[in-house]
Amino acid sequence: MVGADLKAEIMKLMEKRSALEAEMNAIIESLCQPGGPGLSRNLVDSEGFPRADIDIPTVRANRCRLAVLRNDHEDITEKINQNIQVLHSAKLAPTSVAAEDTSDMVTNNHSTNIGISATSNYSDLGSTSSAMNVDVILSKPFAMVDEITEGSPAAEDGLQLGDQVVKFGHVEFGENLLQRLAAEAQANRGQALPMIVLRQGAIINLTVTPRVWEGRGLLGCHFRIL
């Protein structure tokens, strides 16, 4: 019953990760409110005095907490990936009752910084928390949004920290993912681009439009290959 135990452990880790993502998003929303200090803005005014319009101790505490949560999120994601690899390895063994496609497993851990403009046209296609769907969902995502730049199209248009990318335009799991992601964004500059992400146990459909903005890239978020 190793497979069943691994599935249960993966589900628990996913729940913990979802809780972390919710807390991170709440902190980011608080820091990035209009007129707020943001994730990295200076806490002193032009004359070098502490800003009087914000609660500096609270801002510092929130920024420190966000850093801790990001580290915990990365650790949990790594544990999930390790368990997925063990689970699929077990299913490929000769004693496996049913063969399953494991071609969608991602083992590299690189990242790319491209940006997103999204029209928030997403819909929940249903919960994926049931055990029968674990293998299908966990085998699909190939990248995760682990950073969103303040004021970026991604932040304004619906992408959230922790979203796991299942499909970006025509890009799905395969080789040369970083190059393919960047090329897809460039090729569709100013055009609506379908995107599918896994968010807190649910598949979400997005329509994103890569575009030039005042920040770096066309998307304004950071993708880490899982």
Image: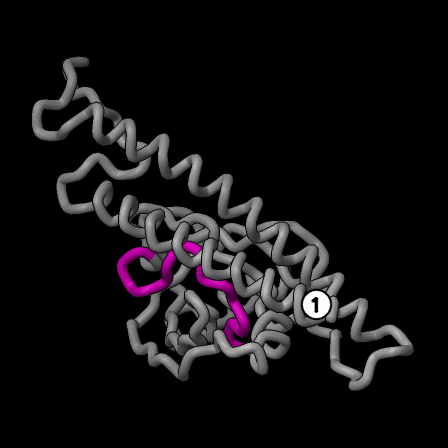
Locate residue 217, reporting x and y percent: 44, 52
Look at the image and say whether residue 199 sits in the magenta stretch.
no
Report the amino acid beneath label 1.
Met
Position of residue 182 in the picture relative to residue 190 (left or right): right
Q: Quadrant of the N terminus?
A: bottom right
Q: What residue sits 40% from the left and 83% below the top? A: 125
Q: Residue furthest right?
A: 94
Q: What residue sits 68% from the left and 63% below the top? A: 84
Question: Tell me, what colour scheme is on the image?
Answer: one colour
Query: Can residue 187 be spotted in the picture?
Result: yes
Locate residue 95, reporting x and y percent: 88, 78
Total label count? 1
Query: Can residue 194 be spotted in the picture?
Result: no
Locate residue 5, reporting x and y percent: 66, 65
Q: What residue sits 19% from the left and 25% below the top? A: 56
Between 74 and 194, the one lying in front of the other is: 74
Q: Quadrant of the C terminus?
A: bottom right
Q: Residue furthest front?
A: 1
Tell me the SS state at disc 1: loop
- 184 over 155 or under it: above or below: below
Locate residue 186, reporting x and y percent: 50, 65
Look at the image and say whether residue 159 sits in the magenta stretch.
yes
Q: Residue furthest top?
A: 48
Label 1 crowd (10 A; few <14 / some 14-19 / many >=20): some
Position of residue 126 in the picture relative to residue 26 (left or right): right
Tell me which segment is drawn in magenta: 155-169
Image quarter of residue 64:
top left
Position of residue 161 in the picture relative to residue 52 (left or right): right
- 101 over 60 or under it: above or below: below
- For label 1, the residue is 105
